[in-house]
Amino acid sequence: NMGLSAAVYASLTQLGYGDPTAVAASILTGTLIGAVNAIAVVYAGIVPLLATLAVMNVVAGLELVLTGNTVLPASTPFLSALSASDSFGMPVLAYVLIGFTAIATAIVQYTPLGLRLYAVGEFPDAARAAGLPLRRLLAGAFVASGLSGGIAGILSVSYLSGSTTGSGEMLLPVVVTALLGSVFSRRLVPTVTGTLLSALLVGFLTNGFQLLNISSTLVSGVQGLLILIVVSATTLLRRREA
């Protein structure tokens, strides 16, 4: 999703379109991908893992077609502003991350909508018995996830000064981040802040391996080991609580 949204942004800027059009197109692209996932899972009844993997492969193919498997450079005033730093040396993208995290935390953890989302995710039978619109909430979550992917595509273009052909390599780090999010959260229930801490940890590990000139193969092995440890630990802890 991020890769295709970034490719859409870079393609439009190369065609002479302005930042507002490129931003709108990227966000729309991400939202449409989320909507496709929602239709596949909620309305077609496909297992979420299979549905999202299938959509991911379709989207990756569209990205390759759009970019020709090359990096499309992009440079606009808006991208330059995003990639800049303030007078203290703090990147603007860091402020974007903090702001987005604060907004997502406020929505997910401190509103009735967030409480309903937790109920649908953790206790679907109880949520259904309480009369919550499960299908609508689940579809909305997929669409919101897709929209976030579109925003990530814009930030990726700013960070890399163009599109990227290596977005598929981020799949394993994203999975690690999502699973570790429950470890950094209370009661093994994933939270936005816990996922942020997880993302920072994965980023520090990856950057540290690069600084030490450790091969990417070993990095993937460590990330896979983290997945195995986290899944095993959370499963055992939940069994003990039960």
Image (cartoon, grey):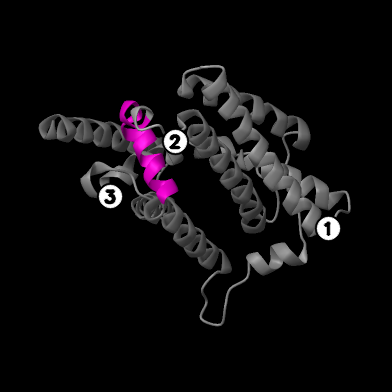
- Give the CA separation, mark 3 to mark 1: 41 Å
Q: Which of marks 2 and 1 is in front?
A: 1
Q: Can you give x and y, in whole percent of width and height, for residue 200 in the image?
A: 39, 55
Q: Can you give x and y, in whole percent of width and height, for residue 99 in the image?
A: 50, 64
Q: Residue, x 52% and y 67% (percent of image)?
A: 95
Give the main secondary structure of the magenta stretch.
helix
Disc 2 crowd rating (10 Å Cα; few below 14, some 14-19, many 20+) is some
| Viewer can see residue 47 | yes
Q: Is residue 113 magenta?
A: yes
Q: Identify residue type, mark 2.
A: Leu
Question: In terms of image quadrants, where is residue 188?
Answer: top left
Q: What range of the chain is rendered magenta?
A: 112-127
In the rendered image of this protein, does residue 112 appear above or below residue 88? above
Q: Residue 155: give its label.
A: none
Q: Can you give x and y, in whole percent of width and height, for residue 28 in the image?
A: 70, 43
Q: Residue 18: give its label.
A: 1
* Outermost residue to the right: 16
- Give the CA separation, mark 2 to mark 1: 34 Å
Q: Does the magenta stretch include residue 117?
A: yes
Q: Identify residue type, mark 1.
A: Gly
Q: Can you give x and y, in whole percent of width and height, for residue 12 in the image?
A: 82, 48
Disc 3 crowd rating (10 Å Cα; few below 14, some 14-19, many 20+) is some
Quadrant of the image containing the C terminus: top left
Q: Residue 185: give its label.
A: 3
Q: Which of marks 3 and 1 is nearer the N terminus?
A: 1
Q: Is mark 1 on a helix, strand or loop?
A: loop
Q: Do the residues labelled 3 and 2 touch (CB within 8 Å)?
A: no
In the rendered image of this protein, does residue 161 appear above or below residue 28? below
Q: Name the residue under label 2.
A: 172
In the rendered image of this protein, does residue 72 appear above or below residue 239? below
